[in-house]
């Protein structure tokens, strides 16, 4: 029989009382009793568990010790609590009261550990107590592939830990690992998976440069990677990695990592939101205990869940009486997606027929008048026959469309789309999820900035080309003047100079006559491009025509770049939209079928129309095609073809110029390398479909989405809504209310009970 060792039953630390009596563990404070028969009972019971065989000589003392142990547990309930409690990973069990930095530090320090490996030091924090074991979260780059490390508490207690989970990924949001320690050590820290507000106070506890359990403080600077990364100005140094980033409520809001950018004032942490999704994949860290709660432990919401469902059903019936069936259908799907994904933003939804601007109304499709007609609700033919006819024709034409504006949070689908997706609610959910992704990711603003960026690039190229054309025109006039002067010096007359003067005067007159045409063309484009085009005034007709040819080329490149950028936004909305749909309980595979079969994207067709003949869409191929650009560049137009001595000195240039002379390459057909690069890095519809297919094959990830969505929908509240009869649209609020009060509008448009608020 092996020699028995007495340990604290809560934290596993060795205990060695000087004599019989009541004591508390030096490391975790758990109460225990030592001495007499009880001490021997503990000794014998542990000895039995540590023997490989059965020894009858210890059965009777062990049984007697067990009886006394039961009496002690009955006498000391706190001891029973420490013996049996399995503390789960806690999310959002945080106080609503803000605490001082000193109080937060004192409250959480016992849950922070130092992590020591053979290659360095780091930090971690305790997230779980279960079955007399403790689980610690740290960074993957802290353990660096180690299987066994050493952890140290603030009170000096040290124990070895084994690595039971290592994401082992270089991608920042996966820089996570979980350690297991025998015994219940330290304190479990609560995690707040709600994202912190930008500007809120946070503190970091860790071991920077080996200085154990050091506190630094700062604020949240930004949220990145869709809320998976928190940027802060909290001072972090090597050794802080793996330590908690704690908010002013005493909850862990992230785990510090130095695996991103080691720069002063630019530090990052993986958010608790991402930590939760990682922990959910670990079966041994189930958030719910595997036991049936007593009736007294069942909350009121759990007990009356049936009544809750009935209350929500009554709220939906109330909405159905007010709304058009198409609008109600759109509302129910949108509301479910918003609730399942916890999207905290008001959304206005509407169903429209749309307008055929080109045909009946004779409007430019990009004009504000056309846009207004698109957003108008159904118009009676007596009220406005033209708009009514335009809406009817648009519906008959079957122009299926859905649109979202992230600036205003507005989403609408048209009747043609609903007809296209008749009997396919899950594919309609995919469309709405896709448009909601555009809103949540603020794609309208991103597209506006991209348009200005590419317009500015085009304007810069246009200005540079006009400057060159003006210099060339001035150079030609100068050379003509020199030649005319030499000619007249030999002839003794002013004939050549007079002819040149007349020609220049005629060109100036022609330039003045072209000025209105230049202004008219400039007004068709954005202000930044228009400003560049107006610089063409003063050029002769010959050079104006050359300028217009280059203008078309540069504007085409700008449009291609913007189209490629939009293609990237659609790709992002596709991926995020499938996640939104899955969280709401819809089949994400239907989304793939929607975008590839039912309603495939049309950005490839637009790119194909803009590209010159013979140039394929780089987005349909892998980006590696740009590694070797030499072959493509051999056929590009080169202005040096007009310089004879350069052509004679370079055989490659001579061959290229011959191709140009044959008309196989035109200056206006050249596409800039920047535009080709943008097209290649923003995948085509086919490549996007393959990427989405690979994304939805990650079943574990989508199971996490579904579980989170189901949990979000189990709340006893629902989102309030407000119906606007004039615009036939509905605003789904981000305010949660009792289902009995939803949609009643008793407190007006704002939903504010001012008497209750002020009094």
Image (spheres, helix red, strand yellow):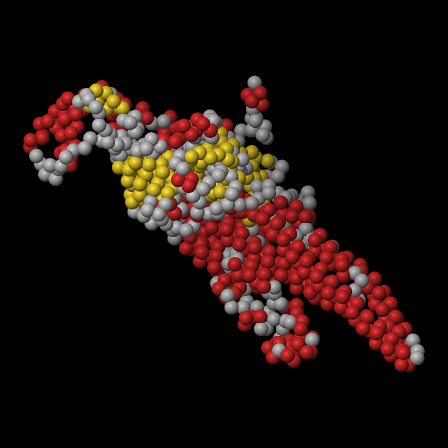
Q: Is residue 758 among the parts visible in the rendering?
A: yes
Residue 247 percent location from the top left of the image: 46, 33
Q: Nearer the viewer, residue 32 or 565?
A: 32
Whether residue 422 is visible = no
Image quarter of the C terminus: top right
Q: Residue at x 44, y 34 (%)?
A: 215
In this rendering, would 143 be left or right of 649? left
From the viewer's side, name the closer residue of 691 and 306: 691
Q: Is residue 393 left or right of residue 738?
A: right
Residue found 63% across the figure and 58% down from its top: 558
Which quadrant is home to the N terminus?
A: top left
x, y percent for residue 481: 84, 72
Residue 469, x across and y down, in percent: 74, 66
Q: Residue at x 44, y 58 (%)?
A: 690
Left or right, residue 77 beside residue 757 = left
Judging depth in this view, the residue of 681 and 72 nearest the camera is 72
**Most distant residue in the left direction:** 56
Q: How many marks?
A: 0
Asked if 554 appears above or below 166 in the picture, the reply is: below
Q: Residue at x 46, y 57 (%)?
A: 689
The answer to whether residue 457 is above or below residue 752 is below
Q: Is residue 234 above or below residue 653?
A: above
């Amino acid at each position: 029989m092996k020699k028995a060792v007495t340990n604290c039953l809560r934290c596993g630390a060795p205990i060695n009382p000087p004599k019989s009596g009541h004591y508390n563990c030096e490391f975790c404070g758990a109460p225990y009793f030592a001495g007499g028969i009880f001490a021997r009972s503990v000794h014998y019971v542990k000895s039995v568990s540590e023997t490989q065989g059965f020894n009858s000589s210890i059965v009777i003392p062990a049984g007697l010790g067990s009886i006394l142990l039961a009496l002690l547990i009955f006498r000391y309930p706190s001891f029973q609590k420490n013996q049996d409690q399995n503390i789960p990973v806690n999310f959002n069990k945080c106080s609503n009261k803000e605490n001082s930095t000193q109080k937060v530090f004192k409250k959480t320090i016992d849950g922070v550990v130092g992590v020591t490996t053979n290659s360095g030091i780091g930090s971690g924090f305790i997230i779980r107590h279960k079955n007399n074991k403790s689980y610690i979260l740290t960074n993957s780059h802290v353990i660096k592939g180690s299987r066994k490390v050493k952890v140290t508490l603030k009170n000096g207690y040290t124990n070895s830990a084994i690595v039971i989970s290592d994401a082992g990924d270089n991608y920042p949001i996966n820089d996570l690992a979980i350690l297991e320690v025998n015994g219940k050590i330290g304190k479990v820290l609560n995690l707040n998976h709600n994202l912190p507000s930008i500007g809120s106070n946070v503190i970091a506890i860790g071991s920077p440069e080996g200085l154990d359990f050091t506190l630094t403080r700062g604020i949240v600077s930004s949220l990145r990677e869709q809320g998976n990364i928190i940027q802060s100005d909290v001072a972090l140094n090597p050794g802080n990695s793996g330590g908690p980033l704690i908010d002013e409520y005493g909850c862990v809001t992230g785990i510090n990592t130095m695996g991103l950018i080691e720069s002063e004032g630019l530090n990052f942490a993986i958010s608790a939101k991402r930590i939760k999704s990682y922990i959910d994949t670990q079966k041994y860290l189930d958030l719910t205990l595997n036991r049936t709660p007593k009736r007294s432990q069942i909350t009121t919401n759990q007990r009356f869940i049936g009544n809750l469902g009935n209350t929500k059903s009554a709220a939906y019936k109330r909405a159905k009486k007010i709304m058009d069936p198409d609008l109600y259908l759109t509302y129910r799907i949108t509301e479910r997606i918003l609730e399942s994904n916890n999207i905290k933003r008001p959304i206005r939804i509407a169903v429209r027929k749309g307008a055929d601007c080109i045909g009946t109304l004779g409007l430019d499709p990009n004009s504000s008048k056309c846009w207004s007609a698109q957003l108008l609700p159904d118009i009676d033919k007596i009220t406005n026959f033209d708009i009514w006819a335009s809406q009817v024709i648009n519906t008959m034409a079957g122009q299926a469309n859905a649109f979202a504006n992230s600036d205003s949070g507005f989403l609408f689908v048209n009747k043609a789309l609903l007809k296209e997706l008749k009997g396919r609610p899950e594919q309609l959910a995919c469309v709405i999820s896709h448009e909601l992704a555009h809103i949540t990711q603020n794609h309208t603003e991103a597209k506006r900035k991209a348009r200005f960026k590419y317009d500015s690039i085009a304007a810069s190229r246009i200005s540079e080309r006009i400057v060159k054309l003006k210099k060339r025109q001035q150079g030609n006039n100068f050379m003509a003047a020199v030649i005319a002067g030499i000619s007249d010096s030999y002839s003794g007359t002013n004939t050549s100079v007079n002819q040149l003067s007349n020609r220049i005067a005629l060109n100036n007159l022609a330039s003045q006559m072209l000025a209105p045409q230049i202004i008219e063309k400039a007004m068709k484009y954005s202000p930044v491009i228009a400003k560049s085009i107006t610089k063409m005034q003063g050029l002769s007709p010959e050079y104006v025509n050359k300028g217009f040819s280059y203008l078309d080329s540069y504007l085409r490149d700008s449009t291609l770049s913007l189209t490629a950028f939009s293609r990237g936004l659609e790709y992002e909305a596709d991926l995020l939209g499938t996640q939104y749909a899955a969280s709401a309980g819809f089949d994400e595979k239907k989304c793939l079928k929607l975008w590839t079969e039912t309603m495939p994207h049309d950005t490839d067709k637009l790119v194909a129309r803009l590209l010159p003949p013979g140039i394929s869409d780089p987005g349909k191929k892998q980006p590696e095609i740009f590694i070797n650009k030499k072959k493509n560049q051999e056929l590009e137009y080169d202005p040096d073809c007009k310089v004879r001595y350069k052509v004679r000195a370079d055989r490659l240039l001579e061959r290229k110029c011959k191709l140009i002379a044959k008309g196989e390459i035109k200056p206006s057909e050249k596409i800039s390398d920047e535009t080709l690069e943008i097209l290649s890095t923003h995948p085509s519809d086919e490549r996007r479909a393959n990427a989405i297919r690979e994304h939805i094959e990650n079943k574990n990830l989508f199971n996490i989405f579904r579980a989170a969505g189901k949990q979000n929908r189990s709340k006893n509240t629902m989102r309030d809504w407000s119906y606007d009869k004039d615009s036939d649209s509905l605003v789904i609020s981000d305010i949660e209310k009792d289902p009995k009060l939803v949609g009643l509008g008793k407190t007006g448009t704002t939903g504010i009970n001012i008497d209750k608020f002020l009094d």
